[in-house]
Structure formats: C-alpha cells, structure tokens
Amino acid sequence: DSGVTQTPKHLITATGQRVTLRCSPRSGDLSVYWYQQSLDQGLQFLIQYYNGEERAKGNILERFSAQQFPDLHSELNLSSLELGDSALYFCASSPSGSRSYEQYFGPGTRLTVT
Amino acid sequence: AQKVTQAQTEISVVEKEDVTLDCVYETRDTTYYLFWYKQPPSGELVFLIRRNSFDEQNEISGRYSWNFQKSTSSFNFTITASQVVDSAVYFCALSPPFTGGGNKLTFGTGTQLKVEL
C-alpha cells in the first residue's frame, strides 16, 4: 500500500458526461501528479500540482481540469467525455525536498465511457 | 524532449530462469533520474528503484539487479531465478533534473513478463 488513495475505484459513464476523480496524497506529500494509462497512449503525464499550485502540464486535454485543495487532496475533472477517454487514471504523490523525485502511485481509477 | 524505449513488448520464461528487461532512454539533460515500476495484474504501479544519472554503480536487491550504463543510455533490469509472482508489466521511466517541486515521469511502453511453471 503506497499510502495514496483514489476514489472511486471504477467509474462507468456515458459519452458527453462529466466526472470527478479524487486523490488523497500520502501524509506530508505536497506534490500530486495525474497520469492516464490507455491502450493507445500508454502511461502519460497529465498535470502536477505542488502545494495548491499548478507546477507542470503534460498532454492534458482542454476538456480536463484539475485542482489541489488546501488539505492537499486533488481532483481531476473530465468533461464532455468521449469513448477515447476510457482509461486507467493514476494519481501519484511525492514529498518535497531531496526526495521529491520519488513518486508513489495510488491504485488508480478505471474509467469506462460507453 | 525525453524518451524511453522498451523494445521488448512481451517476454515469456520458465520459472527459475533469469530474465533481463531492456530500457534505453534519450534526454538532453546532463542530470536526470531513472526508475523501474512494476504493474501486476491487479493494476497498481509499484516503485522498484530509482537511479541518479551521476551514480553509475549497479545495484542488487535480492533477486533484482539493475545495470546502468550512461555510455549506451541504458538502464536494464535483471530478475534472477524468476518466479510466477514476477509476472507483471514492467515500466522504465525517466525524470528531468531535480527542481525541488517534483518532476513528471516519462514512461516507456512497458514489457509484459510472463513466468510459467
């Protein structure tokens, strides 16, 4: 158990809908990362937050947005969902300082868009 | 831009055989970090090892060992005396220099390892 929690574990929804994925980082970790794992694209970095502020952006669609709250949990919002958004979405967290390169992943949320 | 190549899509071995998973990377950074993660059938990503680019010492942890060669931009992973529980997808990943706030990981496409009895 990495200490990173993600909810829900599974999500099934229809095209055009909007969903919110939630992530709680390990205690004390200030950075939160979101990754998408799909058959087509593999494991791809989406976005990173550090202590509430956006730190880095990857291949994140405009239909997707994220935020990190004062209690450090993070939410990834996916809107106008398409079939191609079906994927496993991982959240990871890392500590600050010299060990900030160590990312610990949550169990993932499997999103199925029908 | 950073890139990680895992040319082996799938490897099948018989239990107790040794197996090496290859990883080749590309980066313009002079310092960087390399990682291996394991993804068992249950789906979670498990951190295995991290290596700094300025530390080329090989590392051994039980049945696992890692061979980092900066000259060939490779970071290969060997499992000795493989076991059925080693069956998983293994990902190699690359991270840019430490910035204090964390960094994104660039993953390879993964190698599916199947260990059979």
Image (cartoon, rainbow, N blue to C red):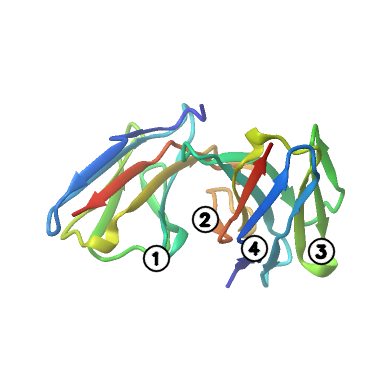
- Amino acid type at mark 3: Lys
Do callouts 4 and 3 point to residues on the same chain?
A: yes
Find residue A59 and name its label. 1
Q: Counting other residues with Cα less than 10 Å from the Cα at mark 1, is it few (<14), some (14-19), or many (20 or more)?
A: few
Q: CA distance from mark 2 to mark 4?
A: 18 Å
- Callout 3: chain: B
Mark 4: which secondary structure? loop
N-terminal-most mark, 2 or 4: 4
Do callouts 2 and 1 point to residues on the same chain?
A: no
- Amino acid type at mark 1: Asn
| Rendered location of residue A26, percent (x, y) | 47, 30
Q: Decide if residue B77 is on the left or right side of residue A110.
A: right
Q: Counting other residues with Cα less than 10 Å from the Cα at mark 4, is it few (<14), some (14-19), or many (20 or more)?
A: many
Q: Which residue does the numbered mark 2 point to in the structure image?
A: B104
How many labels sit on residues? 4
User: Which is closer to the viewer, label 4 or label 3?
Assistant: 4
Find residue B70 and name its label. 3
Q: Which residue does the numbered mark 4 point to in the structure image?
A: B6
Residue at x 41% of width, y 43% of height: A91
- Amino acid type at mark 2: Lys
- For the N terminus of chain B, which image quadrant? bottom right
Verify CB contact (< 8 Å) between mark 4 and mark 3: no
User: Which is closer to the viewer, label 2 or label 4?
Assistant: 4
